[in-house]
Structures are given as structure tokens and as C-alpha cells.
Image: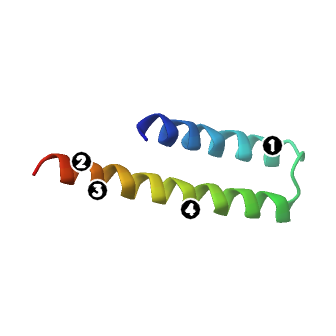
Amino acid sequence: MSISLKEANESLYWIDLLHDTDYLNEKQYVEHYNMNKELIAMLVSTIKTTKLNNSK
């Protein structure tokens, strides 16, 4: 899960870069950015839950 989180964070960088270079229009940027942020939130939650359950 940690590797997935790192990759998702890197994807944000690339999404920003694609938008800054006008490869993605505003609508595409917002859609991909929001989906990626949701994925990051899910991964963070999963990692926290796993760590909490493993510490019991």
C-alpha cells in the first residue's frame, strides 16, 4: 500500500505537469486530479487502519 501511495503522489506531479504544458484541458485536469486525490485519501486511510490493527 505504501508503494501505491508513493505512485499516486507521483501521479499528481505528472497530472500537474500535463496541465501546465496544456496537454490536459481544465476539465480533464480537474477530473484526473480529483480522482487521484480520492485514491490518495483511500490509500492513506487503508495504511492507517492496517498500522492500527497490526499494533493491537
Q: Could you say where residue 2 lies in the image, as x and y percent from the top left?
A: 41, 38
Q: Could you tell which of marks 3 and 1 lies nearer the N-terminus?
A: 1
Badge 2: how crowded within 10 Å, few (<14), some, or many (20+)?
A: few
Please name the residue that numbered disc 2 is placed on: 51
Evaluate if marks 2 and 3 touch, with contact meaning CB atoms under 8 Å apart: yes
Of the 4 image quadrants, the one containing the N terminus is top left
Residue at image position (38%, 54%) is 46
Residue 43, percent from left and from top: 45, 52
- Please identify the quarter of the rendering in which residue 38 is found: bottom right
Query: What residue did someone put label 1 on?
Result: 18
SS at badge 4: helix
Please tell me whether mark 1 sits on a helix, a strand or a loop: helix
Q: Is there CB contact under 8 Å for labels 2 and 4? A: no
Q: Amino acid at mark 4?
A: Glu
> Gap between marks 2 and 4, in whole Å?
20 Å
For label 4, the crowd category at 10 Å Cα-Cα, with few meaning under 14, some 14 to 19 and many 20 or more, is few
Q: Which residue is mark 3?
A: 49
Specify which label sits upstream in the sequence, 1 or 2: 1
Residue that protrudes farthest toward the top in the picture = 3
Camera-side residue of 21 and 30: 30
Label 2: state its secondary structure: helix
- Which badge, 2 or 4, is on the more N-terminal residue? 4
Query: Which residue in the protein does label 4 denote?
Result: 38
Q: CA distance from mark 3 to mark 1?
A: 33 Å
Task: Say how many tags the image has.
Answer: 4
**Residue 39 locus on image (x, y percent):** 55, 56
Residue type, label 1: Leu
Q: How far separated are the C-alphas under marks 1 and 4?
A: 19 Å
Discs 3/1, front:
3
